[in-house]
Image: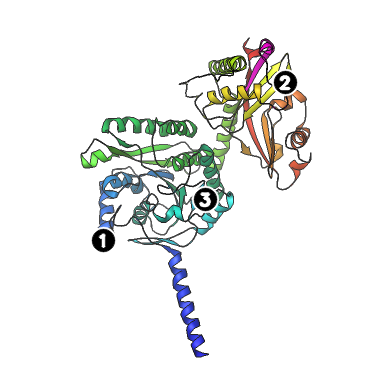
Amino acid sequence: MKKNKVLLVLFLLVCSNTCFAQQVKAPVASGTYYPASPKILSERIKQFLEWAEVKKADKRILALIAPHAGYDYSGGVAAHAYKLIKAQPISTVIVIGPSHYVRFEGFSVYSTGNWQTPLGNVPIDTEIAQALIEYDPKILFYEPAFEKEHSLEVQIPFLQMVLDDFKIVPIATGNLSYENCQLLSEALLTATKDRDDILIVASTDLSHYHPYLKANEIDGFTIDGLKKFDPQSLYYKFITEECQACGVTGVIATLLYAKAKGIADVEILKYANSGDVTGDKSRVVGYLSAAIYANPAGNPVSGAAGAEEEKMVKENREMLSPEEKKRLLEIARETLDKYVLSEERLEVKEDNPDLMKEMGAFVTIHKQGRLRGCIGNIIGRQPLYLTVRDMAIEAASNDPRFPAVASDELKDIDIEISVLSQPKKVEDVNQIEMGVHGVIVKRGYASGVFLPQVATETGWQREEFLSNLCAHKAGLDPLAWKQEGTELYSFTAQVFGEKENN
């Protein structure tokens, strides 16, 4: 009996030690990316902070962009961001960095315990971490993403030197897509709510291994894109490699997060590259620190967000100029004629930045006033002009309701294009305006969409519109839109056609 008690005590001690070990994540970048000695590390960061020249912020800081290379290379640039938040009333820092060593879909959130650096342990904000994980299945704890990753860890010693009592939420980003950037932004908005004691840190380096002058040119485009505060356009420039950054997802998600709060106030604090430090300018890496400011005291974020939302709805109704609409119609017509006559896809290139944005679009074909085909993408996954080209082909050849368009029909066909804003979840159906909003319904694997002009063409009121959407587009019960578990999303559309241009 005594032996069993001894074994039980030993078992509990082992379990206790194991559980404790699991609660503390040991550093992986200590001794390589930054000094392992607490004394040397703290002195080094103090020196960086003393050298950094920044003006004291007179506004609350919503987010920072900071580099994550070794301190010898990028520490001086990072210090400009962290000096700005010294002694700020920040309780939680959400650090978003790329996964350099493991590929996966979505986001990995470290959700419990503490992260250790030579300067001590920092606790995880489990409440926010869990709220993020509960938001969407693509946001989860995936341990391999953190096993070797430095992009998150190198930010923490700086935070320990400028903040007192704070928690962290480390987020490693997986595969890049604009949809994922939007998802993370929306999850952050939900998890942080109206708290004003939270800081976002987007961890990223800029261009990699170009000659000094070429790196300055590429990074200049990135800096210009940040100043313009157009996340979608900047994302496309990253995809085409006009701009470069390894932490693209975190940067774009942070910009979207700020924009959703009605904020577009960014300051570039410092730019340099490794050539400025080492003197070797043959193959350099770019570094940037920047701050995104919240609205001044007395101007609530919620009010600004409402004004921004109203402004965005207004702008979405007229997203394109007459010349841009004309060009898209030309692309759709040339595509349609070429594909129907030869089954060849039109080769087309555009340099208009508005037509290069990733936006959803539908192409509708009418023959002598009657519907002949209509297919589109709700979410933009490529430049708008290519979406219009591809949807013109789909509408002419792959609408299951109609046979493919024949060559002798071309003279009787007119084209209409609907360019869509980003869908937004509907919390109250009374917010849906007939003739202004298109609606997407989702329930389980079933989904359907009506464009805004459907209400105008049919004369349906809101309940008729939603019931027909459920029944005839999604194959659901006509009243499914009222039922728990059904999701509705609204969007606006700029609709234009060949008829109005003739």
What is the spatial separation of the Cα atoms under label 1 and label 3, in whole angstroms? 35 Å
Instruction: Give me the residue at 35% from left, 48% from top.
Output: 82
Given residues 285 and 494, the one toward you in this image is 285
Q: What stretch is highlighted in magenta?
A: 399-417
User: Looking at numbered disc 2 in the image, what kind of residue is underneath it?
Assistant: Leu
Which mark is first along the chain, 1 or 2? Answer: 1
- How far across and down, in percent of the image, does residue 97 sit? 42, 47
Instruction: Tell me how far mark 2 sits from mark 1, CA to CA.
Output: 74 Å
- Along the line of sight, the residue nearer the viewer: 90 or 323: 323
Q: Mark 3 points at which residue?
A: 195
Residue type (three-letter) at the residue carrying disc 3: Arg
Frontmost of labels 3 and 2 is 2
Residue 60 found in image quarter: top left
> Magenta span has 410?
yes
Label 1: few (<14), some (14–19) or many (≥20) C-alpha neighbours in 10 Å: few
Q: How crowded is mark 3: few (under 14 residues within 10 Å), some or many (20 or more)?
A: few
State the mark number for residue 39: 1
Secondary-structure class at tag 3: loop
What is the quadrant of residue 369 in the picture? top right
Marked residue nearer the N-terminal end (1 or 3): 1
Mark 2, residue position = 371
Residue that extends furthest to the bottom in the rendered view of this protein: 2
Residue 491: percent from the left, percent from the top? 63, 32
Does residue 331 lie above or below 423 as drawn? above
Say which residue appears at 20% left-offset and 39% top-offset: 279
